[in-house]
Amino acid sequence: MRTFLLLLAFLGLALAQSEGAKVYSANCQSCHQVNGQGLPGAFPPLTHLDKVVQAQGGRAYLIRVVLYGLQGPLTVEGKAFNGVMPPFRQLKDPEVAAVLNHILTAFAKSKAKPFTPEEVKAQRAKAYAPQEVLKSRPPVK
Ligand code: HEC
């Protein structure tokens, strides 16, 4: 019985991970590239996101980026970007949580506590313009 439960837990984890990877390849990979390395001058990498998620307000910011998009000048790892990311409001709360958990663990090697669908839902209460999302970004360079 214990082995069975353990197996179920592993299976659940594997499924959750593969959902995030699926959402990523369908919605994000065309810009942020297969390993989240981005494209210089156009699309920022996602490998630095541990710093963002650990900063104050970082969790809410990351959810908003996915739900509402992002627009305006920002500096990532010393490189300047000034582009437009489209919103992904159409993704369901568990999909947003899964894709954030995927990029954080697979690309940013983050040990931050996983995002939950409830956390995503809370950020739907107030809609943000992509420029406002940028204003809520923690001061991480
Ligand atoms: C059409 C291209 C495009 C797609 C598709 C896209 N992004 Fe982005 N993303 C961008 C651009 C451009 C920026 C930077 C916007 C700016 O310069 O203000 C960005 C910024 C980000 C940031 C902010 C990084 C930081 O340090 O603040 C995160 C996180 C992010 N994207 C995650 C995602 C995820 C997750 C998906 C898929 C659900 C996705 N992106 C899909 C183009 C894209």
Image (tube, grey):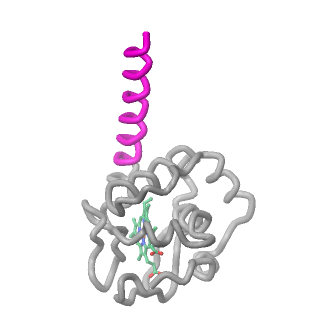
Horizontal arrangement in the rendering, residue 70 relative to residue 77 (left or right) = right
Point out the image quarter for the N terminus: top left
Residue at point 39%, 34% (across, down): 15
Tell which residue pokes out farthest to the right in this image: 125
Above or below — where is 32 with respect to 42? above
The reply to whether residue 98 is in sight is: yes
Horizontal arrangement in the rendering, residue 118 relative to residue 52 (left or right) = right
Taking depth in this image into account, of 119 and 73 the one nearest to the observer is 119
Residue at point 62%, 82% (across, down): 135
Tell which residue pokes out farthest to the top in this image: 1
The picture places residue 118, in percent across and down from the top left corner, at 65, 46
Above or below — where is 61 with respect to 23? below
The picture places residue 31, in percent across and down from the top left corner, at 33, 68
Q: Quadrant of ligand 1?
A: bottom left
The picture places residue 21, in percent across and down from the top left corner, at 35, 48
Taking depth in this image into account, of 15 and 105 the one nearest to the observer is 105
| Residue 57: quarter of image | bottom right
Taking depth in this image into account, of 137 and 30 the one nearest to the observer is 137
The picture places residue 65, in percent across and down from the top left corner, at 54, 68
Above or below — where is 129 with respect to 99? below
Tally of numbered tags: 0
Horizontal arrangement in the rendering, residue 94 relative to residue 27 (left or right) = right
Q: Main secondary structure of the magenta part?
A: helix
| Residue 83: quarter of image | bottom left
Above or below — where is 119 with respect to 73? above
| Residue 104: quarter of image | bottom left
Residue at point 57%, 78% (across, down): 137
Q: Which residues are magenta?
A: 1-22
Point out the image quarter for the C terminus: bottom left
Residue at point 27%, 65% (across, down): 33
Is residue 5 inside the magenta stretch? Answer: yes
The reply to whether residue 27 is in sight is: no
